[in-house]
Amino acid sequence: MFLKTHSLPLLITLISLPFPSCFGSYRLSEDPFHIDFRQAHAYRRPTTYHPYSRTFGVSNQRNYHNPNPANLFNYNNEIWSRLDRARAPVAPKIVNVDDFGAKANGRDDSQAFKTAWKYACSSSQGAILVVPKNKIYHLKPIDFSGPCKSALVMKIYGTIKATVNHSDYKKDGRRWLYFENVQNLKVEGGGIINGNGRTWWQKSCKINKALPCKEAPTAVTFYKCSNLRVAGLRIKNAQQMHLIFQKCVNVKAFNLFVIAPGNSPNTDGIHVTETQNINIKNCVIRTGDDCISIVSGSKNVRATGITCGPGHGISIGSLGARNSAAHVSNVIVNRATLSGTTNGVRIKTWQGGSGYAKNIKFQNIVMHNVSNPIIIDQNYCDQQKPCSKQVSAVQVSDVLYQNIRGTSASNVAVKFDCSQSFPCRGIFLQDVALRPQEEDIAEASCANVKLSYRGNVSPPCSS
Ligand SMILES: *[C@@H]1O[C@H](CO)[C@@H](O)[C@H](O)[C@H]1NC(C)=O
Ligand SMILES: *[C@@H]1O[C@H](CO)[C@@H](O)[C@H](O)[C@H]1NC(C)=O
């Protein structure tokens, strides 16, 4: 009996622990983009249990060796407090990088971050990794690797700045902050992640044509992460791309400011590759390359409330480079404003590729002085020597452009430059109103495309 009363609080503790399988309960409703994202610290409270409603207090009394009323009271008190502890949420461990030796004094803080991450990641009660505000921490490339024992929150209140010593990146020249194989992770806090990219931009072959073309590090990479939330951060001046989601599942990325100069080379804002079920929402992206790029292996991608520009616009692709097979499907871009970008909404594929880009919706989009507001380019070629003509192509089909309006910086507001052997199919234009920014005219240039129209579409394809 005594054992029983002792094991009861333990039982309740077990019930109230965060239950990892809860986070895995992602389900698709009829809406293929619906994401059911649970709170990482959801726990179940035993609501019906009340100690007075049970009889064990009475049997305690009977089994208690010293039935002194004072002792009885104390004993019950102890049960009470134990029950309270058991019923309270299990507080996640607070792990402050300063407690692990981070100094934010201009010197390298990498070791402190590594140790703090290890400690947080091995906590079985959940952890909040804190990067304090009003401080600037300098980091070399770091792997934040999982799996972790329980849900983790990284609260970046302050600034994290990248080392500019290029030899620090020797081990893998393509990464700086690298989150790998972490489940149930939130990265948030309102702070700044600064890739300090200027020295990399200067070394780019796109800036200095005499230099060889080399990869530069991505500022923040999430690789094989699931149930991930990245929110409320400023990511700026990346060495190359700002934020990559690769092989991730169930991602929410929202309230992000991604900012770099318009002439910084290859500084894509958010790059989505081989990732499924991702919701990008309310982001402001001003960089030197695509604001959002979505490439092969990505499915169920939704981007809502995006402010883009300067930059190269919102792109699906490039796909099919070096005769590769590419598969992208179920993409919705809804409510975007693009200003002064070289493209608006773009699908770009190389000649010689295979596979598909299909089921794509571009809806409710405003263009301000965008050079190619609507473009499908199946002759994409981003290399120094010209691309040779090839027969095969990534099939582009079922693309909706709905309520797209604003101004074009070039004469060609709508361009469908599709493959002769694999024409674009199921291209649907509804309520498109694009007019020239300056005088002149705005026209549509259309090759190898099967189109349908609804509502007013201007400019229409002429043939
Ligand atoms: C750059 O980093 C390398 C190795 O990571 C180191 O040996 C070198 O002293 C550093 N240079 C400077 C200027 O800090
Ligand atoms: C529109 O864009 C063109 C080309 O990018 C640029 O030269 C021009 O100054 C822009 N006009 C306005 C009004 O922003």
Image: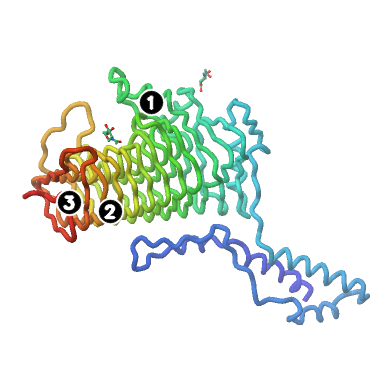
Q: Is residue 238 left or right of residue 44?
A: left
Q: Residue furthest left?
A: 463
Give the vertical position of 251 relative to 207 (above or below). Answer: below
Residue at which label 1 appears:
201
Mark 3: is the Cβ under 8 angstroms from ligand 2? no
> Marks 2 and 3: CB-CB under 8 Å?
no
Query: Which label sits in the foreground, 1 or 3?
Result: 3
Q: Earlier in the sequence, mark 1 or mark 2?
A: 1
Q: Is mark 3 on a helix, strand or loop?
A: strand
- Using the numbered discs, state the Cα–Cα distance from disc 2 to disc 3 in whole angstroms: 16 Å
> Marks 1 and 3: CB-CB under 8 Å?
no
Task: Tell me which residue sits at (51%, 62%) in the image.
Answer: 21
- The quadrant in which residue 160 appears is top right
Badge 2 density bin: few <14, some 14–19, many ≥20, Cα 10 Å: many
- Residue 326: give x, y in percent of width and height: 24, 47
Residue at which label 3 appears:
458
The residue nearer to you, when weighing 370 against 290, is 370
- Residue 269: give x, y in percent of width and height: 38, 40
Give the vertical position of 313 relative to 398 (above or below). Answer: above
Whether residue 381 is visible: yes
Q: Which of marks 1 and 3 is nearer the N terminus?
A: 1
- The quadrant in which residue 203 appears is top left
Q: Which amino acid is tagged 1? A: Trp
Task: Please give the label number shown on residue 362.
Answer: 2
Query: Which label sits in the foreground, 2 or 3?
Result: 3
Q: Indicate which quadrant contains ligand 2.
A: top left
Mark 2: is the Cβ under 8 angstroms from ligand 2? no
Badge 1 density bin: few <14, some 14–19, many ≥20, Cα 10 Å: many
The residue nearer to you, when weighing 299 against 123, is 299
